[in-house]
Image (spheres, rainbow, N blue to C red):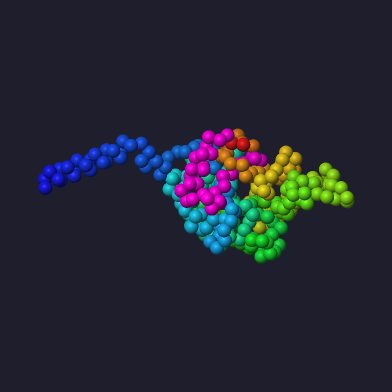
Amino acid sequence: MRNMKKYGLLWLLAAVAWLLLVPGMFHGRGTDVWYTDRVAVIAYHHIDDHTQGDVTITTARFRGQLTDLLQRGYHFISLQQFRDFMAGGQLPPNAVLVTFDDGYRSFYTNAYPILKELNIPAVNFVITKDLEHPDQSLIPSLSRDQIRFMTREMKDIDAQCHSDSLHDRAPDGGPLLTSRLPKDGGAEDLPQFEQRITDDTKACVNKLKELYDRPVDAYAYPFGYYDEQSIALLRKAGIRYGFTTASGLTGRDADPMQIPRINAGSPFVKENSLNNLIIKSISRKSS
């Protein structure tokens, strides 16, 4: 019996020593610095437990992804912190900005309670024409009152632009933001095209400014399509930050109108694999 206790103690000591010597045994939990002076902007669309789709995940998956990142030592930042960073300010390591596209009502009913519970900031890029009749869009959209409530209750919840009515396709299949529409038997001339894009952007900005008193100067490109001309027109209408669908991390020297984002809202991104997507993006050059 004495020998058994002796060998048991030796085994325990050996096991502890092995755990201490094996590198990475507890890698990625709470204290690791994956990157500094960069931001991982992650993108979602629809959070729903009853429908399936390429950009839809369940509330459990959403909560699991965010909780996993928190446990690994990621720090969630607000849009204002992102602005300050791009202007030269400092951020904590492993900084993450959470974004949503399309302004679906599920942000209010399913995502927002989790964000509030975990105290995580987020930005929703809203299609503002849907504010008029939020129940009539293909997927129910946020109402004005819901946006007012969230942005007042949590100072780090933001509503920004996903266009007013440009989230659609032209007759030739091209994105409205970059395509000239048929007009008078031909196509829009350049001044008409520029006026349409500028007017739409100003309409989006003004509708959101009516709902809360923070800056509205960020824009997620519909379908991820943009070009130099559309960037110039958005800037003319007051947009300072453009968010793309290209994957990567954002450094301070990145083009503020071409901010990359990592797609976190796919059903193929499991709770513990969003971290892998971020790590994979670290080596990519910020665009």
Q: Is residue 251 left or right of residue 168?
A: left
Q: What residue sits 47% from the left and 51% below the top?
A: 271
Image: magenta residue range: 256-285
Q: Nearer the viewer, residue 97 or 272?
A: 272
Residue 272 on image: x %, y %: 46, 48
Visible residue check, residue 89: no
Using the rendered view, name the quadrant where residue 52 is placed. bottom right
Q: Residue at x 17, y 42 (%)?
A: 7
Q: Can I make out residue 54 in this image?
A: yes
Q: Nearer the viewer, residue 208 or 273?
A: 273
Q: Residue at x 69, y 45 (%)?
A: 225
Q: For this view, does 257 lie left or right of residue 47?
A: right
Determine the residue positioned at 48% across, 57% down.
Answer: 60
Residue 6 among magenta residues: no
Q: Residue furthest left?
A: 2
Measured as percent of width and height from the top left, residue 248 is found at 57, 40
In the rendered image, the quadrant that contains the C terminus is top right
Q: Position of residue 178 (x, y in %)?
A: 75, 45
Q: Does residue 272 show up magenta in the picture? A: yes
Front-most of residues 38 and 148: 38
Main SS, magenta residues: loop
Task: Give percent across and percent down for residue 157.
Answer: 57, 53
